[in-house]
Amino acid sequence: MLVAIGNFLFRFRNGLFPLAFLLVFLPGPAVFPTDVVAAIVGAAVALLGQVVRGATIGLKYIVRGGKNRRVYAADLITEGLYSHTRNPMYVGNLLILTGIALASNSLTCLAIAVPMFVFFYIAIVAAEENFLRGKFGEAFDFYCRDVPRWRLRLNGLGATMKSMEFKWGRVIVKEYGTPTGWIIGISLVLVQNIWASGQPLNPAPTAVVVAEACAIAAVIGWIVARVLKKTRTIVPD
């Protein structure tokens, strides 16, 4: 049953982030003393998730998207961060989604969103592991015995980073949309929370000005990365 659910969710997993932004508007008891603190904590957690995703892509990239919207893998990748945790991209995703939920400063959002997304990714990983085990057999079983599914094994991480060339260009052209999305999302959530609290937005409080500046910087970064990609100034390898 879990594998079947995971196969279904895999087809629509790109919609998980938009769903997270809808959930942040669920009203509920405050988690942090102020919305600004919530935004800062949420952004820090999301940034940690972005670092995990960036490190994963920069060291060893796995073509995402499956094949015909189904789970697929041409090779069993065990290098880079995949030698320290079996699902580094999903770990990064969960951290980003948790950061967005924290930024909402709503206990209701946090209580619903985080367990829901954890279940979603557990199901997706079950489907992927079912496919990988069927295709790679004993090699995948050996890999599972050596590498934890979710926990990041820190032993040897420094050696891994030093032994592999980090592809910054690949990170830029493959990943520019993700940070743009969560930075703008958290910025909008902060502004909305400040407005909902009854504070005037004109003249804008310092927190609103900072949020707007972050959102604008994210958009500019997205445009620059997009141009670099489309003009093939940076070609991922």
Image: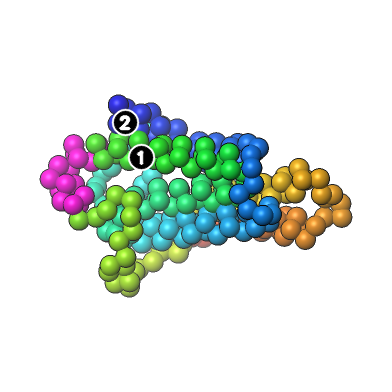
Q: Which residue is mark 2?
A: 2
- Residue drawn at the location 43% of the way across and 55% of the way down: 53
Q: Are marks 1 and 2 in contact (CB under 8 Å)?
A: yes
Q: CA distance from mark 1 to mark 2?
A: 8 Å
* Amino acid carrying mark 1 in the image: Ile
State which quarter of the image contains the N terminus.
top left
Q: Amino acid at mark 2?
A: Leu
> Where is 74 relative to 1, above or below?
below
Q: Position of residue 191 (x, y in %)?
A: 73, 49
Label 2 packing within 10 angstroms: few (<14), some (14-19), many (20+): some
Does residue 81 appear left or right of residue 183 in this picture?
A: left
User: Considering only vertical position in the picture, is 114 above or below 47?
Assistant: above
Residue 215 image position (x, y, % from top left): 67, 54
Write down the region rendered in magenta.
Answer: 131-145
Q: Is residue 20 left or right of residue 206?
A: left
Q: Position of residue 17 (x, y in %)?
A: 52, 41
Residue 168 higher or lower than 27, as above or below: below
SS type, badge 1: helix
Q: Is residue 28 magenta?
A: no
Q: Which residue is mark 1?
A: 122
Asked whether 197 or 15 is in front, the reply is 197
At 81% from the left edge and 45% from the top edge, which residue is drawn?
198
Q: How many marks?
A: 2
Q: Earlier in the sequence, mark 1 or mark 2?
A: 2
Residue at the right extreme? 203
Corner quadrant of residue 138:
top left
